[in-house]
């Protein structure tokens, strides 16, 4: 078995969701789910088949994001993995809906941070074994950090 790391190529202002699913129907079901969340949400997605023609299946409502998802899905190269890039929306607004898609088995990450995908490769193929999401902690929050966190959540409308 060979272990490698794949850096996800993305601009800092985009959010990415990486997960695992099954069945070719995943692409259309993810697309329909994301379209139904908000008319403002822009997204691109790619899903890697693990059998049959083993193609990267793509969809989205933003050509650039779909192209970016495709490029990264090719780099990851792990069967039944999917990647979604979001603009004009955040993972917190779409994760529950994505989890409800019957083909979705799990979510590895949902972030705007720099991401590396940890890959194991065997004779059978490639699989995602983990994610490196952003940097390591630099310390523990103090009272002023807690207050700033609480204010931010209220400022952006996630808490009252």
Image: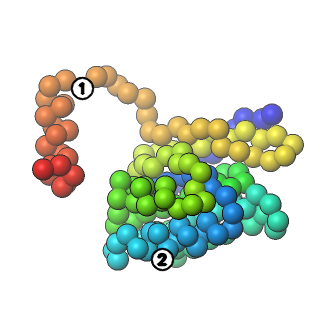
Q: Evaluate whether residue 67 shows in this view.
A: no
Q: Is residue 103 above or below residue 19?
A: below
Within 10 angstroms of label 2, few (less than 14), some, or many (20 or more) residues? some
Within 10 angstroms of label 1, few (less than 14), some, or many (20 or more) residues? few
The residue that appears at 81% across and 68% down in the rendered structure is 53
The residue that appears at 58% across and 73% down in the rendered structure is 28
Residue denoted by label 1? 141
Q: Position of residue 121 (x, y in %)?
A: 77, 41
Residue denoted by label 2? 61
Q: Are marks 2 and 1 in contact (CB under 8 Å)?
A: no
Closer to the chain start, of discs 2 and 1, is 2
The residue that appears at 52% across and 72% down in the rendered structure is 31
Query: 160 or 66: which is nearer to us?
Result: 160
Q: Secondary structure at mark 2?
A: loop
For the N terminus, the quadrant is: top right
Q: How is the image coloured?
A: rainbow
The residue that appears at 65% across and 38% down in the rendered structure is 129
Q: Position of residue 109 (x, y in %)?
A: 49, 46
Q: Secondary structure at mark 1?
A: loop
Q: Position of residue 22 (x, y in %)?
A: 67, 58
- The image quarter containing residue 136 is top left
The residue at the far right in this view is 123
Query: 74 or 80: which is nearer to us?
Result: 80
User: How many marks can you see?
Assistant: 2
Label 2 vs label 1: CA separation? 39 Å
Q: Position of residue 76 (x, y in %)?
A: 66, 51
139 on left or right of 142: right
- The image quarter containing residue 103 is bottom right
Query: 126 or 24: which is nearer to us?
Result: 24
Residue 118: assigned label:
none
Q: Evaluate whether residue 143 shows in this view.
A: yes
């Amino acid at each position: 078995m060979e272990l490698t790391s794949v850096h996800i190529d993305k601009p800092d202002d985009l959010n990415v969701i990486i997960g695992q699913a099954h069945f070719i129907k995943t692409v259309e079901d993810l697309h329909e789910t994301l379209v139904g969340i908000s008319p403002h949400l822009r997204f691109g997605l790619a899903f890697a088949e693990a059998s049959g023609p083993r193609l990267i299946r793509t969809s989205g409502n933003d050509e650039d994001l779909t192209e970016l998802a495709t490029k990264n899905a090719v780099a990851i190269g792990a069967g039944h993995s999917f990647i979604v890039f979001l603009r004009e929306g955040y993972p917190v607004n779409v994760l529950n809906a994505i989890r409800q898609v019957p083909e979705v088995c799990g979510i590895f990450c949902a972030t705007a941070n720099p991401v590396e995908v940890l890959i194991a490769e065997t004779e059978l193929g490639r699989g995602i074994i983990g994610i490196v999401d952003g940097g390591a902690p630099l310390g523990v929050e103090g009272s002023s950090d807690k207050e700033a966190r609480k204010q931010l959540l209220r400022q952006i409308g996630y808490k009252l």
